[in-house]
Image (cartoon, helix red, strand yellow):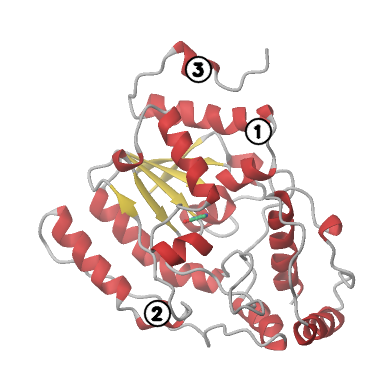
């Protein structure tokens, strides 16, 4: 329960950082939230954007909340969260070339009844996009509002920043592959207008369910290296409990089943924290990625975001 409330609080912080000043919550939802906070006995009795926890980059990596915790709070506030998830799918891909195998995977994912049950009416299940011959695969967390409308990862504000980062590396979006741990947007209460406001991190159960689909994309594309964007992606690829803080593992090469894996901050961290220092930290990680991928690096690229 406390973790689920933490997830909500975290999202309020994200929204505040992206310029949102007000969030509409109707009275019954507010009453349910108060009840949930009381029952959680969490000490978050007055959730406020100002009282949110410190930047995750500096704090212990939050464990994904359990599905039971999210269900408890979301039941209290009448949000649809799938009943206990079935075991993770076993993905069996046909032989053939990459487009054939990817099309088979796409059909599996889009017809997966659990994925479909977790997507609200009119919204889309999301699979990765990009070049099937990409040398670099970026892995994010989960679709957000824009992504579940368009059915494509990283097309909202964080995605636009990721696209600029890719361009800064001298590449186009179509040159790389972009996937997510999750194939659906983790659900939260809808506003009066029937739309979900904000995002929450996926639960461990949700991540475990979708991971075989990410693994299948890696198996098809066979990228030379992977870039995990943020805590959820790093947890999904390195395992829960593999690290305490993102700061402790970012910027160093890891291994994901024989492939080099670079962990860096999620672009939304930069959207919240526009300092040159944080931009430089991500950029230094990407310079390492460029070197590993044997991309040319100009002096100008080397100097991006250095305070002079
Ligand atoms: N954030 C992510 O991690 N993935 C997306 O697709 C969009 C935003």
Indicate which disc, 2 or 3, sits on the residue closer to the N terminus: 2
Q: Is residue 63 visible?
A: yes
Indicate which disc, 3 or 1, sits on the residue closer to the N terminus: 1
Residue at 77% in and 72% down: 2
Q: Are marks 3 and 1 in contact (CB under 8 Å)?
A: no
Q: Residues within 10 Å of mark 1 (few under 14, many from 20)?
A: some
Q: Nearer the viewer, residue 212 or 115?
A: 115
Distance from disc 2 to disc 3, alpha carbons, whole Å, reads 44 Å
Q: For the residue labelled by badge 3, is the local secondary structure a helix, a strand or a loop?
A: helix
Residue at 37% in and 27% down: 170
Distance from disc 1 to disc 2, alpha carbons, whole Å, reads 37 Å
| Residue under numbered circle 2 | 116
What is the x, y in percent for residue 156? 50, 53
- Quarter containing the C terminus: top right
Q: Nearer the viewer, residue 276 or 1?
A: 276
| Residue under numbered circle 1 | 278
Q: Is residue 3 above or below residue 167?
A: below
Disc on res. 302? 3
Indicate which disc, 1 or 2, sits on the residue closer to the N terminus: 2
For disc 2, does the CB lie below 8 Å from ligand 1?
no
């Amino acid at each position: 329960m406390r973790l689920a409330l933490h997830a909500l609080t975290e999202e309020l912080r994200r929204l505040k950082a992206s310029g949102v000043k007000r969030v509409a919550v109707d009275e019954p939802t507010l009453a349910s939230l108060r009840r949930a906070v009381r029952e959680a006995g969490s000490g978050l009795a007055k959730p406020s954007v100002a009282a949110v926890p410190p930047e995750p980059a500096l704090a212990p990596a939050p464990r994904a909340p359990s599905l039971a915790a999210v269900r408890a709070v979301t039941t209290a506030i009448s949000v649809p969260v799938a009943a206990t998830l079935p075991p993770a799918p076993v993905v069996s891909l046909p032989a053939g070339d990459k487009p054939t195998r990817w099309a088979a995977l796409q059909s599996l994912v889009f017809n997966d009844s659990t994925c479909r049950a977790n997507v609200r009416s009119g919204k889309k299940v999301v699979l990765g996009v990009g070049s099937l011959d990409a040398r670099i695969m970026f892995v994010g967390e989960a679709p957000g509002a824009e992504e579940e409308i368009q059915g494509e990862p990283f097309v909202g504000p964080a995605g636009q920043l990721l696209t600029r980062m890719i361009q800064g590396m001298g590449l186009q979006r179509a040159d790389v592959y972009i996937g997510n741990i999750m194939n659906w947007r983790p659900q939260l209460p809808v506003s009066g207008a029937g739309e979900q406001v904000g995002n929450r991190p996926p639960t461990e159960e949700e991540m475990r369910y979708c991971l075989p689909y990410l693994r299948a994309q890696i198996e098809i594309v066979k990228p030379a290296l992977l870039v995990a964007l943020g805590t959820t992606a790093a947890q999904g690829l390195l395992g829960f409990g593999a690290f305490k803080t993102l700061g402790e593992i970012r910027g160093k090469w890891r291994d994901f089943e024989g492939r080099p894996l670079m962990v860096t901050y999620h672009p939304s961290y930069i959207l919240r924290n526009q300092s040159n220092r944080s931009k430089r930290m991500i950029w230094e990680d990407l310079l390492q990625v460029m070197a590993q991928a044997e991309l040319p690096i100009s002096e100008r690229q080397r100097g991006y975001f250095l305070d002079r």
